[in-house]
Image: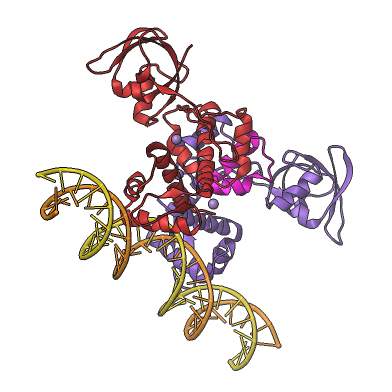
Chain colours: A red, B purple, C orange, D yellow
Amino acid sequence: MASITEENYLKALFNLSNNQGEASISDLANQLGVSMPTANSMVKTLQKQGLCKYEKYKPVILTEQGKKAAALIIRKHRLTEMFLVNKMGFGWEEVHEIAEQVEHIHAPKFFERMDEMMGFPTVDPHGSPIPDKQGRIQELHLKSLSEAVPGQEAVIAALSDSSAEFLAYLNSRQLSLGTELKILSKESFDQSMTVAYGEKERESLSQKVCEKLLIRIFD
Amino acid sequence: MASITEENYLKALFNLSNNQGEASISDLANQLGVSMPTANSMVKTLQKQGLCKYEKYKPVILTEQGKKAAALIIRKHRLTEMFLVNKMGFGWEEVHEIAEQVEHIHAPKFFERMDEMMGFPTVDPHGSPIPDKQGRIQELHLKSLSEAVPGQEAVIAALSDSSAEFLAYLNSRQLSLGTELKILSKESFDQSMTVAYGEKERESLSQKVCEKLLIRIFD
DNA sequence: ATATTTTGTTAGATTATTCTAACAAATTTG
DNA sequence: CAAATTTGTTAGAATAATCTAACAAAATAT
Ligand SMILES: [Mn+2]
Ligand SMILES: [Mn+2]
Ligand SMILES: [Mn+2]
Ligand SMILES: [Mn+2]
């Protein structure tokens, strides 16, 4: 069994590879808040267990085994987040830190029961896909709001930033998953967009915000 | 913050003190499945943190601080067990191992939410009291079934053994918390008792079993 | 193509948790 | 009580996870 520490390295490697295409030692060290020598030595440890491939001065690559292990931890994380929101009444901005701990619990039945009680959800409270029991992740082909054009209508389906701060910002604007947006206009000088949704007739969203909102456009 | 390891030592010391009046190094080592030198050295570590008192060759004594810390971990354990049974549909024989892990999660809101959702239960699924937020434990003055005499009626209120094996035995006999027993007779040669409950007209319970069933006698 | 900066490696040390071996104190037995 | 057994201690070592300091390779900038 991988230790909690090893599990956190696997998850970090998995996320870095998905977001940046590859994972360097310095990225990994930064992500986990450890020194480069620490990351370097842990990568060697993971390699000995067949969880990643590593050659000096080259990016770290998870093996299939490593990817599956990481995906199964992410599965536990996301099921937990969904359970906390749907069954325990937490806000979407409160659940990440708790899930960060619960994801390391070794008790298959515990997570299977959560899954069952929720009716086998496919995404977490932030719209990220929940890997299946085999560690496979379905591709959600979403666009960011900044790619939409005036006149289009879209629904918020996920976020590319799920930090508590961004979630608090969305709460304050009554924006959530499922919110339907009408794109009214886009400023060419700062890429900000004016949209309508719910009770709001005209709300301005900065480029940063638009990039972080992942949408499905209505046909 | 105490590490998971330290938390497990605190819990073991707390339980040994409650069950046996005191906690020796060898008891502690046995309870936790570690060697005596390991237990000895951890006790010194806990002492440095003001969690217990220890003098060479004498029993280990938790300080008030240590007792409170232990009780709060036990609170998380028992709330978790109750939540797993009442809200997630687990059997009382399945929850201990999961709670053994969940009790180490640092997330006050998580446990407060469980508590709220269950309506602030005072005992766990095995009838053991749940310490309050201050770490205080209410005394339930229960007797063991072996102290009862023929003619009396009683209700099963708790267990002095909550091992999965004993729980499975109770399941197989349709015995659970709340089961009302009529004591029919007691054999003087082996202390076994014959009782009636539910659909059962005459069931024989060995002395071992009777000692493990904690009851409240009807007046 | 150098020089500078960034990134990565090695070596050596530290802390936490554990072990075994050897010995010593305390307790139990005859 | 003396012998035997159990319990507890010390010393020394191992593993996991981390650090800093020093150096080396790779990437970037002039
Ligand atoms: Mn999360
Ligand atoms: Mn984690
Ligand atoms: Mn338990
Ligand atoms: Mn535990």
The overriding secondary structure of the stretch rendered in magenta is helix
Q: Is residue B175 left or right of residue B83?
A: right
Residue nearer the viewer, B125 or A26: A26
Relative image position of residue D26 (x, y in whole percent): 28, 52
Q: Which range of residues does the magenta coloring cover?
A: B74-103
User: Given the current orientation, which residue lies at the most extreme right position?
Assistant: B201
Residue nearer the viewer, A206 or B160: A206
Does the segment drawn in magenta span residue A156? no
Does the segment drawn in magenta span residue B89? yes
Determine the image quadrant of residue B27.
Answer: bottom right
Q: Is residue B59 left or right of residue A150?
A: right
Say which quadrant the C terminus of chain B sits in.
Answer: top right
Residue B26 seen = yes
User: Given the current orientation, which residue lies at the most extreme top position?
Assistant: A201
Relative image position of residue B80 (x, y in whole percent): 57, 41
Q: Is residue C29 left or right of residue D12?
A: right
Residue drawn at point x = 47 percent, y = 43 percent: A101
Q: How many marks?
A: 0
